[in-house]
Structures are given as C-alpha cells and as structure tokens.
Image (spheres, rainbow, N blue to C red):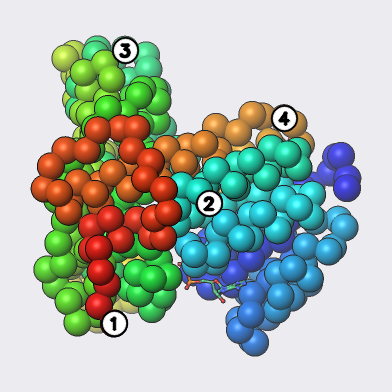
Amino acid sequence: MAANGKVKVGIIGSRFEADIHAAAFQIMPEEAEVVAVASPTAGHPEALAEKYGIPRVFHDYREMLKEPDIEMVTITAPNRLHARMTVDIAKAGKHVVCEKPLCMTLEEADEMIDVCRRQGVLLMYAEELFFTPKYVKAKQMADEGAFGKLYLVKQCEKHFGPHSPWFWDVRQSGGGALMDLGCHGIAFCWWFLGRPKIQSVLCHMGTYVHNDNTQGEDDSICILEFEGNATGVVENSWARRGGMEDRIEVYGEGGVTYADLHMGNALPTYSEYGFGYAVEKAPTTKGWTWPVYEELWNYGFPQEMHHFARCVRGKEEPIVTGEDGRVVQEVLYAAYESARRGAKVQLPFRPEGVKRPIDLWKTELDG
Ligand SMILES: NC(=O)c1ccc[n+]([C@@H]2O[C@H](COP(=O)([O-])OP(=O)(O)OC[C@H]3O[C@@H](n4cnc5c(N)ncnc54)[C@H](O)[C@@H]3O)[C@@H](O)[C@H]2O)c1
C-alpha cells in the first residue's frame, strides 16, 4: 500500500450515506480519493460510480477488499452488518471507517475494536457531530472557559422517520429513533463534556405515530448523569413533522450557548411554486421553508473524512474511534433497559447475550 499520496478509499453501500461519503471526499479532495464502491443491488453502485466518477464497482464487498491499493474502507450498510464488515476489512489489512451506530451489541463492539487492534488498522467511528462546524465552535468556547463549569448539555435530532425500510425493521436496525439518532446525542454530550465517566441513564420512549410501520420507538427522551455533576439530555424523534431538526444547548454557571443546525443556517424562504431541494428530509419546498446552503459542510462530513484520511497517513490521531462507539453502545443498552424498568440504570451496564439493544425494552417482538 502507498505510504504517501492520496489515500485510496472503497465505500461499502451505495445509497443515502454512501452518497454523502462520496460527496464529502469530492468536497475535500486533497487527502483521499474514492476508487471503488461495493453494494449488492445491480445498478445501485453503478449509479453512484457514475455520479462521482468512481472507477471500480463491485457487488460483493469481499471482492473489493481484495484490491491491493485500497487503504481505507467506509461502511454505509445497515447497522446489523457493521461488525461483520469491520472484521472482514480489518483482516484484509485496511483501515475502517464505520458509520453510526457502531454495531448491534457490546460483544460486537469488543470484537471490532479487538480485531482492528490486532490487525494494526484504525477503527474510526463516523460521528460527524465531532466535526460539525457550529458545534465545534461551541466546544471551543466551552473549552476556553466561556461558560464556566458546565452543568447541562442537550442535543436533539428529530425528523419524520428514515428513508429506507430496514431502519423500521428493528430486527435489522436494532432499535428505533434512539438507536438511529440518539447515538449522535449520546456521543455528543459525552464528547462535549470531555468524556467524563457516565454514571446513570434514565430514558422514556414510546411509539406514538408510526405504530403501523414499526415496533421501534418513534420518540425518546434520555437523561445521562456524568461524573463531575453534569447532565446530558438527548431527545430524538421519528415523529416530528417538518424535516430535520438538529440542535444543541449548552449551559454553564458562567454562560450559555445555543446552536440550531438547520433553522440557524438557512434562508427563511416563502415560495408559492416550490423549487428543487430545501434540506434533508424536508417534505416540501412550497410555502415557508428553510433551505440550507453547503449542507454537507455544515454537518461536518467533508471535514470528518478529510481527518480520517489524514489519520491513515499518520498526519493526525483519530479524534473519534471504536471506543467512543462502544461507550455509546453501552448507553443505548442502558437507555432501553431504563425505558422498560421505568427507572434509572447505573453504569457500567453490560448484560451479555443481548441480540439487539431494543430487546432490553421490548422483551418480545411481535411477529
Ligand atoms: N452519520 C449520519 O448522519 C448517517 C446518516 C444516514 C445513515 N447513517 C448510517 O449509515 C448506514 C447506512 O444508512 P443509509 O441511510 O445509507 O441506508 P440505505 O438504505 O440508504 O443504504 C444502505 C446501503 O447498504 C447496502 N447494503 C445492504 N446490504 C449490503 C451488503 N451485504 N453488502 C454491501 N452493501 C450492502 C445497500 O445496498 C445500500 O446501498 C447506517 O448504519 C446508518 O445508521 C449515518
């Protein structure tokens, strides 16, 4: 493998998040180039390859892993496949970028971390909130002491539900809105506060709007207690109308800051006739809308992939790894358990043999 030049990247998956990865590498092309894409549905990887000028297409990712020049592989496949794919990539001697949530179970998380360590490859966890420019600015201010001692950090991500059927099938996704979106907020609060020990998790969830479509929760509220007397609040929804919402609030004894990723970075717009695209998951472009600009940049995806490529070249140390994903995984377990018990769950919480986090809430899935 090359020790210099652009990092050669293969993408597994060819739909929603794969498109974001391909675009992100194109927006910041200095460090890496996508040379291959692999996904099973005929026509799909071809379409992504055509759109982004990716030279090689595979329908079995294991074939792509045989390509000697590929150094880093990004996983944008459904959650249940993340662990298996990570192990295969690591065993092929390539660095791994794994989308969120890291995996389905704590055992899988341990295996992923362990295999990558043994193979001497990086396991980079694709939590883009660590790169979101507005949120990075909030953290810089907090780290400079702008708000004094922090006591409360909140993150919320809400929309009306995912685009692909597998998300709604909790056997494939592992859980509903909390698993899908709460993994961002849990990671965010933990990172923002400087990765203190997480003491307890209290979570309430329910299925309010999408009962016909899923056994997963479509709304959840999760409270994390951190060592050092600070709280994190993570709110998530697949039931919220009106497109994406992604916000943070940071409170310290000396100050406060708020950031709204969508409304705050948008052009308040009224259109009688509609137009091409406003923002991710927006249901319409007619009437009042909040179209964003530089959407991927505002989320932090290009900066994230740029950083990961630099890590492969040894120019930077990964700021978000499999270990972060494992911490999130344990909190997800505790949150589902808390929702079932109706009580706070103390950490560490590492029950063995759990198949999917949601099983701790719904002990028996229908059907
Ligand atoms: N960071 C974020 O904000 C963010 C946003 C969306 C999705 N994601 C994550 O990315 C992952 C993919 O989500 P998505 O929205 O792109 O889903 P999607 O349904 O749009 O795409 C899934 C892709 O995986 C491919 N796939 C399925 N089985 C495969 C296999 N055996 N081998 C190779 N490819 C296979 C499918 O063909 C498809 O191309 C999920 O884990 C999701 O949580 C992250």
Does any atom of ligand 1 lie closer than 8 Å to the CB of label 4? no
Q: Is residue 111 above or below residue 327?
A: below
Q: Residue at x 47, y 37 (%)?
A: 324
On screen, residue 267 versus residue 61, left or right, reads: left
- Sequence order check, earlier mark of 3 and 1: 3
Q: Which residue is mark 2?
A: 108
Horizontal and vertical percent position of residue 159: 25, 63
As helix, strand or loop, the secondary structure at mark 3 comes to loop
Q: Quadrant of residue 40?
A: bottom right
Q: Which residue is mark 3?
A: 145
Answer whether labels 3 and 1 touch (C-beta < 8 Å): no
- Sequence order check, earlier mark of 2 and 3: 2
Circle 1: is it few (<14), some (14-19), or many (20+) Cα within 10 Å?
A: few
As helix, strand or loop, the secondary structure at mark 2 comes to helix
Q: CA distance from mark 4 to mark 1?
A: 50 Å
Horizontal and vertical percent position of residue 316: 66, 29
Q: Which residue is mark 1?
A: 367
Q: Amino acid at mark 2?
A: Glu
Circle 2: is it few (<14), some (14-19), or many (20+) Cα within 10 Å?
A: many
